[in-house]
Image (cartoon, helix red, strand yellow):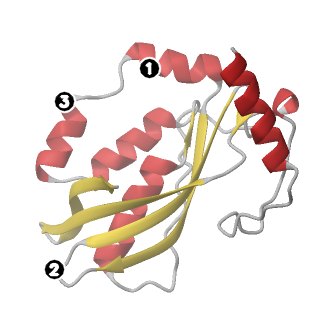
Amino acid sequence: MRRALTALAAAAAIAGCGIDDPYRGDDRQVESVGDARPPADDRPPGSLRTPDPPGEESDEAIRTAVRYALAQGNWSWRTFRAQYAQMRALAHGELASELEANPPDQDVLLGLERERQTNSARPVAATKTQNGAVIVVLRERAGARGVIDQAPAHRVYRATVVDADGAPKVAAWQLLP
């Protein structure tokens, strides 16, 4: 108990020191944890939260990987099923089989709804490597009833995009350490 109180006091002291996080960007909305609410989501349950990838990107593999990333990263308790279906539509091969074989079970869906869980993501960068893999960096922020992450996480993913009957599809998706 004493360690927990010491850690809490240290965190409070550091928070008041004016240390600036260079990765936070422009959206410095600070809310007290007690008043935090997940972002409102009043869309129909079957709607998607996935915007099109940045328009200036002309490479189909990069656009497809970013679309997959946004389908995975932008969801709420109301849109989760539609986002999962979008991921399945963009997947190919083993990844498609894995998504088909392991849909979210009813307990998970009920938990998302009960806690009003949300996740928002926006692409920070996307590029192709020399071996043809696509690297996508997302800035993600999660929320649930009474809690909204104050510091967004930056996650880096590697996608393998293949041509599947004339259309690019994601055949492999990996979160990088």
Q: Mark 1 points at which residue?
A: 108
Q: In which quarter of the image is residue 159?
A: bottom left
Quadrant location of the C terminus?
A: bottom left
Q: In which quarter of the image is residue 78?
A: top right
User: Circle 3: is it few (<14), some (14-19), or many (20+) Cα within 10 Å?
Assistant: few
Q: Which residue is drawn at 76% across and 39% down?
A: 10
Asked which secondary structure carries label 1, the reply is: helix
Q: Is residue 55 left or right of residue 8?
A: left
Q: Residue at x 62, y 16 (%)?
A: 114
Q: Mark 3 points at which residue?
A: 101
Q: Where is residue 27 in the image (x, y as percent from the top left)?
A: 77, 61
Measure the alpha-carbon separation of dots 1 and 2: 37 Å
User: Circle 1: is it few (<14), some (14-19), or many (20+) Cα within 10 Å?
Assistant: few
Three-letter residue code for mark 1: Val
Disc with the residue nearer the chain's start (3 vs 1): 3
Asked which secondary structure carries label 2, the reply is: loop
Q: In this view, does 46 lie to the left or right of 156?
A: right
Q: Which dot, 2 or 3, sits closer to the camera?
A: 2
Measure the alpha-carbon separation of dots 2 and 3: 29 Å
Q: Where is residue 138 in the image (x, y as percent from the top left)?
A: 50, 61
Asked which secondary structure carries label 3, the reply is: helix
Three-letter residue code for mark 3: Ala
Q: Where is residue 29 in the image (x, y as percent from the top left)?
A: 83, 53
43 or 119: nearer the viewer:
119
Q: Where is residue 158 in the image (x, y as percent from the top left)?
A: 29, 63
16 or 45: nearer the viewer:
16
The disc placed on residue 131 is 2
